[in-house]
Amino acid sequence: MLASETAINALSPPAPSSSPAPSKQAEVPTTPASPGSTETPGSPTNESSGTNGSPGTTGTSGTTGTSGPTSTRIPPHQDVFWASVQNCLTAVANISKACWGEEGEYRKERKPLRKSLGIKKDNPLKPLSMRNNFEHFDEQIDEWFSKSKNRIHVDRIIGPANIIGGVSTKDMFRVFDPTTAEVVFWGERYPLKTIMDEVTRLYPLARSLGDKPV
């Protein structure tokens, strides 16, 4: 629950400082970008590769520049956000394995546990596919490289999944859609808010049952 809450909270920028603002705005550190690629500062923020595997980035409009500006550094709080999302997926996967076993291996044996917690067949905690997308990212890169037609690598987007036009689903990796509170990977949607609600429901119930004498 803590990891998922951190993932949501990390979207919020740091609170403004009470100290007076400097007379001149500090320059944003930049790193050289490859010719033919740009990144537009602002939201949504993303990291992506150019066409045919060449390094590059896609800006807010979803178009790739032809030359010129250097790419800006990803804000630190977004690194925290994506680390928190992955921690949340891992924690939820452990709950799933406790209730069903790996790939449902112990679903029959652990039916009494699920019944005591009020967990039904369609419980949102059960699927492991999104956790696997993040955990086995190297395998997803291999599959993308062999199947993607244009090899446009779009990743770590915070914004609606359709914010960038003209990009195939197979080229869209990690996306968080704040309009629905869903994590999206290759078009597969993972309802993070629904997951948080279910974990919030289960936690006090599991603690209560665990405190009862055997």
Image (tube, rainbow, N blue to C red):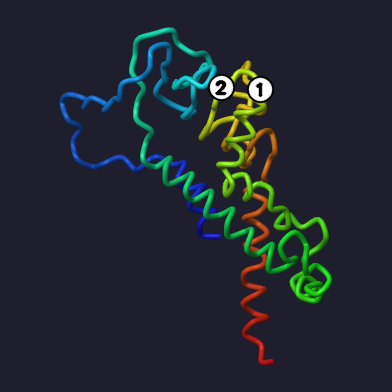
Whether label 1 touches label 2, CB < 8 Å: yes
Position of residue 1 relative to residue 173, above or below, is below
Amino acid type shown at disc 1: Ser
Residue type marked 2: Ile
- In this orientation, which residue lies closer to the viewer: 65 or 206? 65
Rendered image quadrant of residue 77: top left
**Percent x, y for residue 150?**
60, 18
> How far across and down, in percent of the image, does residue 41 sit?
39, 23
Q: Residue at x 58, y 60 (%)?
A: 91
The residue identified by callout 2 is 152
Relative depth, front residue between 90 and 201 = 90
Check the picture and name the quadrant holding the C terminus. bottom right
Judged from this view, the residue extending furthest toward the top is 66
Q: Residue 126 location, x and y as percent? A: 73, 57
| Residue 187 seen in render | yes
The quarter of the displayed image where residue 162 is located: top right
Choose the circle earlier in sequence order: 1 or 2.
2
Q: Residues within 10 Å of mark 2 (few under 14, many from 20)?
A: many
**Which residue matches tag 1?**
168
Q: Using a 10 Å C-alpha cutoff, classify the residue at mark 1 as few (fewer than 14 neighbours), some (14 to 19) or many (20 or more).
A: some
Residue at image location 62% in from the left, 55% down from the top: 196
Q: x, y (%) of residue 12? A: 44, 41
Residue 66, which numbered label?
none
Spatial distance from mark 1 to mark 2, Cα to Cα? 9 Å
**Residue drawn at the location 29% of the way across and 25% of the way down:** 30
Query: Which quarter of the image is occupied by the N terminus?
Result: bottom right
Comparing 144 with 79, the one in front is 144
